[in-house]
Structures are given as structure tokens and as C-alpha cells.
Image (cartoon, rainbow, N blue to C red):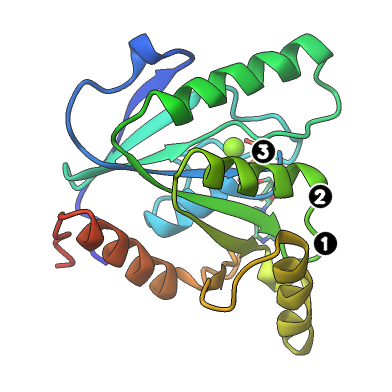
Amino acid sequence: MKIKSVEMNLSATSPKHYPKDDFLQVAFVGRSNVGKSSAINTLLNRKSIARVSQSPGKTRTINFYSVNEQFYFVDLPGYGYAKLSKEEQEGWGKMMERYFIESPNLIHLFLLVDIRHEPKDSDVQMYQFAHHWNIPITVIATKSDKINRSQLQKNISVIRKKLNLLSGEDVFMISSLKKTGKEEIWSKIIDIFAENGVQIDEE
Ligand SMILES: Nc1nc2c(ncn2[C@@H]2O[C@H](COP(=O)(O)OP(=O)(O)OP(=O)(O)O)[C@@H](O)[C@H]2O)c(=O)[nH]1
Ligand SMILES: [Mg+2]
């Protein structure tokens, strides 16, 4: 996939800030620190267009990146960040729920989970919410560089089982450190847009 341009267009906390154009959106969700912003940088071949941090809770707003002036990648704040107060956690929930419900151009979610660990109940909830809201969702296991190759499939099975995935549902892997897994995810993204009537220029 050739990335000709990426622009960090908008940072939103409520629907009045969302893009007003008709570009379709795919969004990246998951627990704090799982590697959402890193995955976006990796997929877009950019070092740090999306801000990355070692401490969880880095991304606090809904960030829209327009890619090739054709579509948006949306970086979302992570959930499950223990240091947030109850009010802040609820605020997160409301901000996200409004985004999911009030974004007709959101066509797909990528749910990122850490390949090293069994998904948490919050991940299961996120996955089920997506079904509830009729938003197609695909799982990406992050940080694949952190375990041995021989363990990869075993860990993917644990993830599949906890999230109760059907056999037809693919789970992708990415390492933002090693920059692996990008091609498979891009071919999925291109399929997603095609299913929604948008032909992405790959060259
Ligand atoms: N080894 C390794 N580290 C990673 C990978 N992806 C992310 N990290 C590290 O994990 C930490 C969190 O990455 P972020 O991309 O900021 O995570 P996030 O999900 O956007 O976090 P929030 O914005 O807080 O929700 C950083 O220290 C990254 O360098 C990966 O594939 N491999
Ligand atoms: Mg982030």
C-alpha cells in the first residue's frame, strides 16, 4: 500500500468536532497501552504522526488522520486505564459511545489486544458492543515481537477462545517494533473499503 499523504486533521471530544466530509473511517480500539497509536504509525509508514507513550493513557481524544485524501484512520483513547478516576472512565465511555453511534461513516473497527495475554473482560465487552451496534470488527494481536514464533498460534487460540470468535473470523498480528504484519492488514483494509464501495488506490 502506497501512503502518499497523511494529515492529522482533527481531534475530537464530541460530535461537533467530527469531520464534516464523506470519507469513510476505520477506527482502532483497545486497552490503554496495547499499541493502537503505534499500529497506526506502522500501517501509515510514519514514525510518530500518532503520539505514542510508554505510560498508558496517552491518547485522550478521538484523532482523525486523513490518508491519501481518500479515507480516515481514527485513533481512539484506550480503555481500562486504572489511574483514571471513575468520572474520567465514564467520560471516556460516553465520548466513545457517541462516536460509535453518531458516526455513519465509521465502517469498521479494529480491536487490538496484546498477543501475550488473554483478553480482559473489557475487551470482550468492546467486541460485543460492536456487534450490538452493528459495526463490523476485526481483531489484531499486537506486539508479536514479544513472544517466540512457536508460541504465536497458541496465543492466538487463547485470544479467539476468550472473544468467542467464529472460525471464519481472521485474527491479524502486528509488530510495530519489527514492522511485520502490515501487508495482511492492508489487504483486509482494502477489502473492507471495497465492500463499502470505495476502491483504494494502492499505487
Ligand atoms: N515491543 C513492542 N512494543 C510496542 C508495540 N506496539 C506498541 N509498543 C509499545 O507499547 C507502548 C504503548 O504504545 P501506544 O501505541 O502508545 O499504545 P496505545 O494503545 O495507543 O495507548 P493509549 O493511547 O494510552 O491508549 C509504547 O511504549 C510502544 O512503544 C509492538 O508491536 N512491539
Ligand atoms: Mg494511543
In the picture, residue 32 is in which quadrant?
Answer: top right
Q: Tell me if 90 is positioned left or right of 139 in this view.
A: right
For marks 3 and 1, give the CA distance: 20 Å
Residue 15: x and y, percent?
Answer: 39, 14
Residue 75: x and y, percent?
Answer: 48, 37
Mark 3–mark 1 CB contact (< 8 Å):
no
- Camera-near label (1 vs 2) is 2
Residue at the disc numbered 3:
53
Ligand 1 neighbours mark 1 (CB distance < 8 Å): no
Residue at the disc numbered 1:
117
Could you say which is closer to the camera, residue 121 or residue 128?
A: 128
Q: Residue at x 60, y 31 (%)?
A: 77
Mark 1–mark 2 CB contact (< 8 Å):
yes
In terms of sequence position, does the residue under pointer 3 or pointer 2 come before the other? 3
Mark 3–mark 2 CB contact (< 8 Å):
no
- Camera-near label (3 vs 1) is 1
Q: Residue at x 79, y 31 (%)?
A: 81
Could you say which is closer to the camera, residue 168 or residue 202?
A: 168
Label for residue 191? none
Ligand 1 neighbours mark 3 (CB distance < 8 Å): yes
- Does dot 1 land on a helix, a strand or a loop? loop
Name which residue type carries label 2.
Answer: Lys
Q: Residues within 10 Å of mark 1 (few under 14, many from 20)?
A: few
- Does dot 3 land on a helix, a strand or a loop? loop
Q: Residue at x 74, y 35 (%)?
A: 56
Whether residue 160 is situated above or below residue 79 in the rendered picture:
below
- Camera-near label (3 vs 2) is 2
Q: Residues within 10 Å of mark 2 (few under 14, many from 20)?
A: some
